[in-house]
Amino acid sequence: VAALVLESPFTSIEALGRYHYPFLPVALVLRDRFDAASAIAEVRAPILVLHGEQDEIVPAKFARALFEAAPEPKEAWFAPEGGHVDLREHGAFEVVADFLRRRVRL
């Protein structure tokens, strides 16, 4: 793996489920936690986290927490007007292209 680009990531599906459904026993019904926060420490490639500040599906706080847990080298880009599925419209493509040009040796 030469680089890892994460678009609208979350720390874990359990944490995201608890955020959206605080009244449900989310942990009891999940088969897989998709615990990205635990797995991110094992990444040995440059990491780029992309997220929209207006994302109502995966709030930006989850991406910030995952970014904090990530090892170096890492970069983050947060689009002030971006939502969950429109980051390209806010410049994400250019950000990813620049990241890959700088971080990946071909």
Image (cartoon, helix red, strand yellow):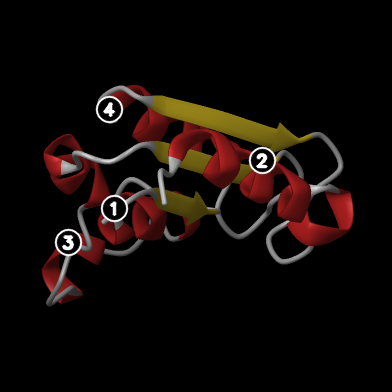
Residue 53 image position (x, y, % from top left): 72, 38
In the displayed structure, 74 sits above or below 13; it is above
The amino acid type of the residue labelled 4 equals Ala
Indicate which disc residue 12 carries. Answer: 1
What residue lies at 50% left-to-right and 28% top-to-bottom? 75
Locate residue 13: give its quadrant.
bottom left
Left or right: 63 as drawn, with respect to 43: right
Residue matched to label 4? 69
Select label 4 or label 1 by which is in front: 4
The amino acid type of the residue labelled 3 equals Ala
Residue matched to label 2? 98
Q: Residues within 10 Å of mark 1 (few under 14, many from 20)?
A: some
Q: Nearer the viewer, residue 8 or 72?
A: 72
The amino acid type of the residue labelled 1 equals Ser
Select label 1 or label 2 by which is in front: 2
Going from the N terminus, do you reach mark 3 or mark 1 first? 1
